[in-house]
Amino acid sequence: MTKPPLTLYLAAPRGFCAGVDRAIKIVELAIEKWGAPVFVRHEIVHNKFVVDGLRAKGAVFVEELEDCPTDRPVIFSAHGVPKSVPAAAEARQMVYVDATCPLVSKVHIEAARHHERGLQMIMIGHAGHPETMGTMGQLPEGEVLLVETEADVANVTPRDPEKLAFITQTTLSVDDTIGIVAALKARFPAIVGPHKEDICYATTNRQEAVKAMAPKCDAMLVIGAPNSSNSRRLVEVGRTAGCAYSQLVQRADDIDWRALEGITSIGITAGASAPEVLVNEVIDAFRARFDVTEEMVETAVENVEFKVPRVLREPA
Ligand code: 2E7
Ligand code: F3S
């Protein structure tokens, strides 16, 4: 039987960012240095395939520091942790390595600087997300107020509207955030903040590529996990940019082939925590069912790399 023709658009950049690369390397090097088990507080990045792979090498994933024995090393995930977490690890005299992405640490430092100057913070982010909890947890209770949407801006009640700064999660929708920042500036003209927001290069670039790709596609698949903020934003960006059938899939098994019957084009991208093997698995699944012509939609070239902490570059 002849296969139907399909143009498969592949977004670039897609997949692993520099912070994810570094975080995974930190876990691997820690296991090499100290042997198994090495404990990891929270999924090192939000991807089951990555987590299962590291578990097989000797990592043990827990949600709270209290779930770790004090005589084994613990690694903090790429999303960052509240200040209380390293403080508790020190109090217990534990060996710990912080795999927080340097671009998240930069926001933590920004927040501390504003606080020292007596400013209260408004964080634009998603409630309950580990990055938001980690960033808000850099300052004492009440010093960081959370807004999730433009509508929230009308209801926020700062101590002094003249003494305010804003910070953001790094994986937000660039376009949604423009609206929220504008609403903050309109209500609090004295608010200070970064030039635009704190969304990272990887988030921005992956969303740009999707915006260029989505209008060409009958359907779009984002490879990523349901708890991956940046991946979920890519699905939303795809829908807004003109591809109504944009879906999140963890891997090829998740693809709803009946929903894709009759398409002649598909767009594929991957969130910052999704490994390229899963992209290849999805492409192979399309090749098995369609006569595929691949086309790259490249909107940026990335060459960002972050060093692993010194303790892991030294011999044991
Ligand atoms: C850390 C940070 O693990 P992810 O899916 O995390 P998100 O924040 O998107 O849920 O992706 C990698 C990553 C992104 N941002 C890790 Cl702060
Ligand atoms: Fe860092 Fe951005 Fe990746 S904050 S972990 S470079 S998605």
Image (cartoon, helix red, strand yellow):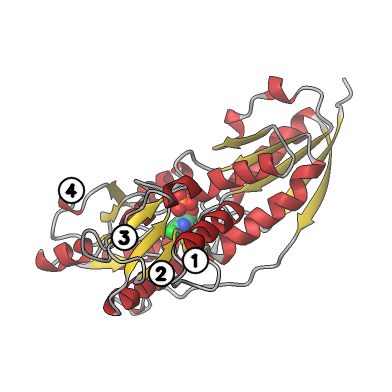
The tag earlier along the polypeptide, 2 or 4, is: 4
How far apart marks 3 and 1 lie (CA) works out to 21 Å
Residue 39, numbered circle:
none
Q: Are marks 1 and 2 in contact (CB under 8 Å)?
A: yes
Query: Which secondary structure lies at badge 2?
Result: helix
Amino acid residing under circle 4: Asp
Q: Rate crowding at label 3 as few (under 14), some (14 to 19) or many (20 or more) other CA atoms within 10 Å.
A: some
Q: Quadrant of residue 238?
A: top right
Q: Nearer the viewer, mark 2 or mark 3?
A: 3
Query: Which secondary structure lies at badge 3?
Result: loop
| Residue 38 against residue 101 in the figure, above or below | above
Amino acid residing under circle 2: Val
> Which residue in the protein does label 4 denote?
67
Quarter of the image that includes the C terminus: bottom left
Is the CB atom of the residue marked by disc 2 within 8 angstroms of ligand 2's nearest atom? no
> Which residue in the protein does label 3 denote?
158
Q: Rate crowding at label 4 as few (under 14), some (14 to 19) or many (20 or more) other CA atoms within 10 Å.
A: few
The tag earlier along the polypeptide, 4 or 3, is: 4
The tag earlier along the polypeptide, 3 or 1, is: 3
Amino acid residing under circle 3: Pro
Amino acid residing under circle 1: Asp
> Which residue in the protein does label 2 denote?
107
Q: Nearer the viewer, mark 2 or mark 4?
A: 2
> Which residue in the protein does label 1 denote?
198
| Residue 261 against residue 278 in the figure, above or below | above
